[in-house]
Image (cartoon, grey):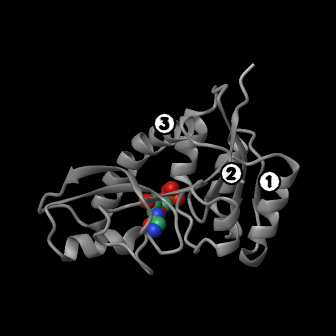
Amino acid sequence: MRDPKRLIILASGSGSNAEAIMQYFQQSEDVIIGHVITNKKNAGVLARAAKFGINADHVPPKEIDDFLLSLHKANRVDAIILAGFLRKISQRLLMVFPHHILNIHPSLLPKFGGKGMYGKHVHQAVKDAQETQTGITIHVVNAEYDKGKILHQATLAISSSDDSESIGSKVLKLEHFHYPRVISQWLSGLKPPV
Ligand code: GAR
């Protein structure tokens, strides 16, 4: 009998990436989504988790660390997956999960990353810069915004008729395909956190 890896998803919004991940691992014997946590009341991700029968809670930002660490104490958490989570990860969490937190960013980092660069702001900046391509970056989280080790990038072409909204929806599709697969591969080589 294999010991499945237990993930916690943190999301702030609609949760379409969280849903792609829940869907991908729904039948998995190797990976369990233990809990979904959001810092936003009524975030769309709560209803998406309910569809999959996964426990989900809105937790005020200041209480997220304690909440997560108590889940970890009760039942080991192997990794934390940020799926559109728009708050900085604390030093306290990084100490317990030093290389065990993944993030997805909707551009080809290091381009269009850093504080304030999230969601539609990224796509608008890409459009304003008249880029001919954009993409996604999946990276390990460290103490600096969008600066951790890059595990995977995927690109897509932008045409002159694209606006920030159409860029955003193409980026989301790419994210939904790649994020669960990269998580799966990354987890297979991941040692337990301390
Ligand atoms: C995604 O595009 C994700 O890459 C982005 O927020 C969106 C969340 O969508 N994250 C960031 O910008 C982080 N800096 P979702 O809630 O539908 O998954």
Residue 54: x, y in percent? 74, 43
Decide: few, some or many residues near mark 3? Use Cα within 10 Å; few <14, some 14-19, many ≥20.
few
Residue 90: x, y in percent? 65, 74
Q: Residue pushed farthest top?
A: 1
Give the residue pinned by disc 2. 193
| Mark positioned earlier in the residue sequence (1 or 2) | 1
Q: Secondary structure at mark 1?
A: helix
Quarter occupied by residue 177 = top left
| Mark positioned earlier in the residue sequence (3 or 2) | 3
Q: Residue pushed farthest right?
A: 74
Tell me the amino acid under the disc marked 1.
Answer: His
Residue 154 vs residue 5: left or right?
A: left
Tell me the amino acid under the disc marked 3.
Answer: Gln
Residue 24 vs residue 160: left or right?
A: right
Residue 160: x, y in percent? 11, 63
Query: Which mark's residue is nearer the viewer, 3 or 2?
Result: 2
Between 99 and 75, the residue placed more toward the observer is 99
Decide: few, some or many residues near mark 2? Use Cα within 10 Å; few <14, some 14-19, many ≥20.
some
Question: Residue at 78% across / 46% down in the picture?
Answer: 76
Between 82 and 11, the residue placed more toward the observer is 82
Quarter occupied by residue 159 = bottom left
Determine contact: label 3, label 2, CB under 8 Å. no
Decide: few, some or many residues near mark 1? Use Cα within 10 Å; few <14, some 14-19, many ≥20.
some
Tell me the amino acid under the disc marked 2.
Answer: Pro
Determine which of the numbered discs, if any, sits on residue 185 in the image: 3
